[in-house]
């Protein structure tokens, strides 16, 4: 069994490897990858891959996928430097992995009505907010108050004892525009819980969406009713335990335990508002009655995500968020202008100093003050993007630390002003 901890260890072991030191990738692999790239624009967003069960993934393939991602990013895709490859991304095909972790550009979601998907607050700076003179830099960038970033759906009643982590991806990718996909992962240290996806595209139209499911793993297929709408239900058991980390606080110092499951249920249906929704339940939530009850509890009520940026450049919009610990904004007018916040996880031994280790600095690291605590600020020669970016690391009330990245044309005062308006409320 390969756990997320094992995969993290493999990735950490490869941190010091430089691309120029690696041997050329096998021609057969490149030919296969190019074939996948040709199909990628039709995938509709890789993060809607609601399957697969865990499989053994060689460290060499993990490294190869990362190199492919980096190559796409250097050709104009967006990426954030501190992002770690997660278990679910590792299990995807090479082309899907690139699309799933690529930085997405501006996202615009239409207001809700009877025929459209539910509204999603973009977190875009509010045009109604007044701007004081000190918020406009000599560079012409205007900072304004940002709207709350939300996840568009709520479960009512809320699942007892399960902690949700939210994600949003899609929009513009290296392969073209992809449908926006929202997901919420509900679990605890004792309960593997379930995962909820929502998108405008039927996940069954994606290539290899049943990868890893065989007649030996699927025990039943049936049709059920969700509030009068027909839904497809698949039941089965994993050939080996499906494991991931239990929910963790970025301020905790102890490694979170693994939580594993043995049975699964996958429910897919199209809601009357046009959205396709999928729920993958694990163990106790893999029973027909349990997963149908979950599906019937979904309501169109936005809920705020824990990580927020309350001050942002005027005209910028939310591009993505992930695992309650990452949030990105982008400038629709300029592809290379992105702003991101990543929470640093203390149990991974991340501090306000570790992000700068091994980086090529374009300015000395300055000690500044954010939230009354010491913080670090420097201009970094970012290996992914051009131009250079400001990196600021600081601490939030409650003990969580964070990394803020902003374009190099921002002033230091603007970077500090944004950093002081970052909040985390789990």
Image (tube, rainbow, N blue to C red):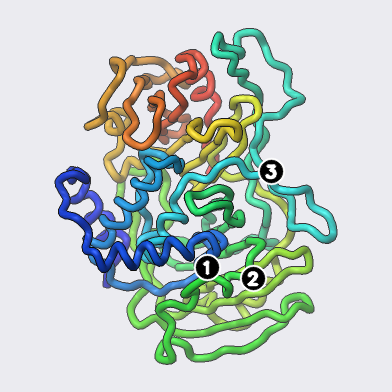
How packed is label 1: few (under 14 Cα within 10 Å), some, or many (20 or more)? many
Q: Which residue is mark 2?
A: 294
Q: Which residue is mark 1?
A: 194
Visible residue check, residue 244? no
Q: Which mark is residue 121?
A: 3
Q: How many marks?
A: 3
Label 3 – label 1 distance at C-alpha: 24 Å
The answer to which of marks 3 and 1 sits earlier in the sequence is 3
Above/below status of 107 relative to 41: above
State the SS at label 3: loop
Q: Which mark is residue 65?
A: none
State the residue lying farthest toward the right: 114
Label 2 – label 1 distance at C-alpha: 9 Å
The residue positioned 58% from the left and 64% from the top of the image is 196
Q: Nearer the viewer, mark 2 or mark 3?
A: 3
Residue 260 spot, x, y in % from top left:
38, 70
Residue 175 spot, x, y in % from top left:
50, 54
The reply, left or right, for residue 390 in relation to residue 286 is left
The residue positioned 56% from the left and 11% from the top of the image is 137
């Amino acid at each position: 069994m390969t756990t997320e901890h094992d995969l993290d260890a493999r990735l950490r072991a490869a941190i010091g490897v430089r691309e120029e030191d690696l041997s050329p990738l096998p021609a057969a692999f490149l030919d296969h990858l190019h074939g996948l790239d040709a199909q990628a624009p039709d995938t509709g967003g890789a993060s809607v891959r609601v399957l697969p069960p865990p499989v053994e993934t060689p460290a060499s393939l993990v490294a190869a996928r990362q190199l492919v991602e980096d190559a796409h990013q250097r050709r104009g895709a967006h990426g954030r430097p501190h992002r770690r490859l997660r278990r679910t991304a590792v299990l995807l095909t090479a082309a899907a992995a690139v699309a799933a972790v690529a930085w997405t550009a501006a996202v615009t979601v239409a207001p809700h009505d009877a025929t459209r998907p539910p509204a999603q607050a973009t977190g875009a700076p509010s045009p109604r907010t007044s701007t004081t003179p000190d918020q406009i830099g000599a560079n012409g960038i205007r900072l304004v108050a940002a709207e709350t970033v939300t996840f568009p759906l709520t479960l009512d009643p809320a699942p007892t004892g399960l902690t949700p982590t939210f994600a949003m991806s899609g929009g513009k990718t290296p392969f073209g525009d992809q449908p926006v996909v929202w997901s919420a992962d509900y679990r605890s240290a004792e309960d593997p819980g379930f995962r909820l996806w929502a998108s405008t595209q039927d996940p069954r139209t994606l290539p290899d969406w049943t990868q890893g499911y065989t007649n030996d793993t699927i025990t039943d297929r049936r049709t059920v009713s969700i509030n009068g709408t027909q839904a497809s239900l698949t039941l089965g058991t994993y050939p080996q335990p499906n494991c991931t980390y239990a929910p963790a606080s970025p301020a905790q110092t102890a490694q979170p335990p693994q939580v594993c499951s043995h049975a699964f249920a996958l429910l897919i249906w199209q809601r009357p508002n046009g959205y396709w929704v999928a729920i993958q339940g694990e163990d106790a939530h893999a029973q027909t009655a349990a997963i149908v009850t979950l599906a019937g509890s979904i309501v169109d009520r936005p809920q705020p995500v824990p990580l927020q940026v309350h001050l942002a450049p005027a005209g910028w919009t939310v591009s993505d968020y992930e695992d309650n610990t990452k949030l990105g904004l982008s400038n629709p007018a300029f592809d290379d202008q992105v702003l991101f916040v990543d929470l640093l996880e203390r149990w991974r031994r991340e501090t306000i100093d570790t992000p700068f280790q091994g980086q090529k600095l374009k300015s000395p690291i300055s000690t500044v003050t954010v939230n009354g605590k010491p913080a670090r600020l420097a201009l970094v020669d970012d290996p992914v993007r051009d131009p250079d970016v400001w990196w600021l690391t600081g601490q939030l009330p409650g003990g969580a630390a964070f990394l803020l990245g902003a374009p190099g044309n921002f002033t230091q005062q603007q970077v500090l002003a944004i950093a002081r308006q970052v909040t985390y409320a789990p």
